Amino acid sequence: MEASESALSRMLSGQKPTRPAVIRGLHTLAAPHAGPTELDREIALTRRLFYGWLQARDPDRLLLYRTQEEMGDLRDRLAEAEDKATGLAAELADAHRRHAMKI
């Protein structure tokens, strides 16, 4: 997480929208011993509160953040699909080698 002291101050005072990555970083710093489930629940609550605030103040930025999150989710799904495809290609190549050795 990168945020200068002045940017962080403006975010926490509500003068500037908080980037979603900063929300996760702040929660991680504030509760380093929280379990993943508890941390995710707190982050989701903060995000809902933040998005409510943002809807009232800057709906266009809210749309941008939601679009960026969706793109991030799609990138994650694409990476998982590529990993699966790589694994399946390796299995196929291995099966082909085993079959070729039998011939």
Image (cartoon, rainbow, N blue to C red):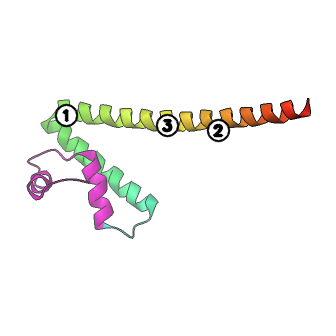
The answer to which image quadrant residue 74 occupies is: top left
The residue mark sitting in front, 2 or 1, is: 2
Residue on which disc 1 sits: 61
Q: Position of residue 59 (x, y in %)?
A: 18, 32
Could you classify mark 2 by the number of other residues whose Cα lies within 10 Å: few (under 14), some (14-19), or many (20 or more)? Answer: few
Residue furthest right in the image = 103
**Between marks 2 and 1, how big is the CA–CA gap?**
39 Å
- Residue at x-position 55% and y-position 34%: 82
> 101 or 36, which lies in front?
101
- Residue at x-position 44% and y-position 60%: 36
Q: Which residues are magenta?
A: 1-30
User: Main structural element of the magenta stretch: helix, strand or loop?
Assistant: helix
| First of labels 2, 3 by sequence position | 3
Which numbered dot is residue 87? 2
Residue on which disc 3 sits: 79
Could you classify mark 3 by the number of other residues whose Cα lies within 10 Å: few (under 14), some (14-19), or many (20 or more)? Answer: few
